[in-house]
Image: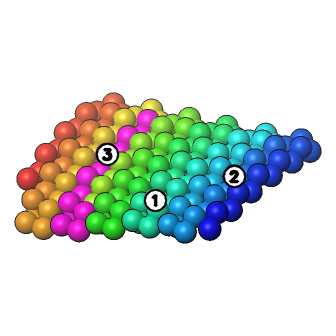
């Protein structure tokens, strides 16, 4: 089936919703709201379990979230938050135990973390922190 919904409301705010649904389980949602803030959500879902979410929120901060998931266990998350700081997170995991994380945070310091783990117990970690100091850690 297919369903399309478009809604717009104006009263010191703006709301825009687009909804699409198909027999193949495809879902697309766009939501925008402005009342001293901005919200943008895009979500897509398919029968192959692929999920894509983009969210932006601005009220003295900014948030971006992108998440993808597949039937093979693949997960990808990118998150950015800015409120006198910045945070970046990327995570990937597979059914074979593969894990990859990259995180960056800046609030008078910088933090970088890269971690990889496999079912064969292989571990790789790179961490950098700068707040009047610098640290690098590599573990295998």
- Number of other residues with Cα within 10 Å of mark 1, as a class: few under 14, some 14 to 19, many 20 or more: some
Q: For the residues carrying marks 2 and 1, which lies nearer the camera in this image?
A: 2
Q: Quadrant of residue 61?
A: top right
Asked if residue 26 is positioned above or below residue 17 in the image, the reply reads: below
What residue would you read off at disc 3?
102
Q: For the residues carrying marks 2 and 3, which lies nearer the camera in this image?
A: 2
SS for callout 3: strand
SS for callout 2: strand
**Which residues lie in the magenta part?**
94-106
Q: Is residue 105 magenta?
A: yes
What residue would you read off at disc 1?
51
**Mark seen at residue 18:** 2
Q: Residue at x 41, y 42 (%)?
A: 88
Q: Residue at x 20, y 44 (%)?
A: 126
Point out residue 26 in the picture as x, y percentages from the top left corner.
Answer: 53, 61
Q: What colouring style does the render use?
A: rainbow
């Amino acid at each position: 089936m297919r369903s399309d919904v478009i809604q717009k409301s104006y009263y010191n705010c703006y709301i825009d919703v687009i909804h699409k649904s198909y027999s193949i389980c495809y879902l697309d949602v766009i939501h925008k709201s402005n009342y001293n803030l901005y919200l943008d959500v895009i979500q897509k879902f398919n029968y192959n379990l692929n999920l894509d979410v983009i969210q932006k929120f601005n009220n003295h901060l900014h948030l971006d979230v992108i998440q993808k998931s597949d039937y093979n266990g693949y997960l990808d998350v990118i998150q950015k938050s800015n409120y006198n700081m910045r945070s970046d997170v990327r995570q990937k995991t597979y059914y074979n135990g593969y894990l990859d994380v990259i995180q960056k945070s800046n609030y008078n310091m910088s933090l970088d973390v890269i971690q990889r783990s496999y079912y064969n117990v292989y571990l790789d970690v790179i961490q950098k922190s700068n707040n009047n100091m610098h640290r690098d850690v590599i573990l295998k």
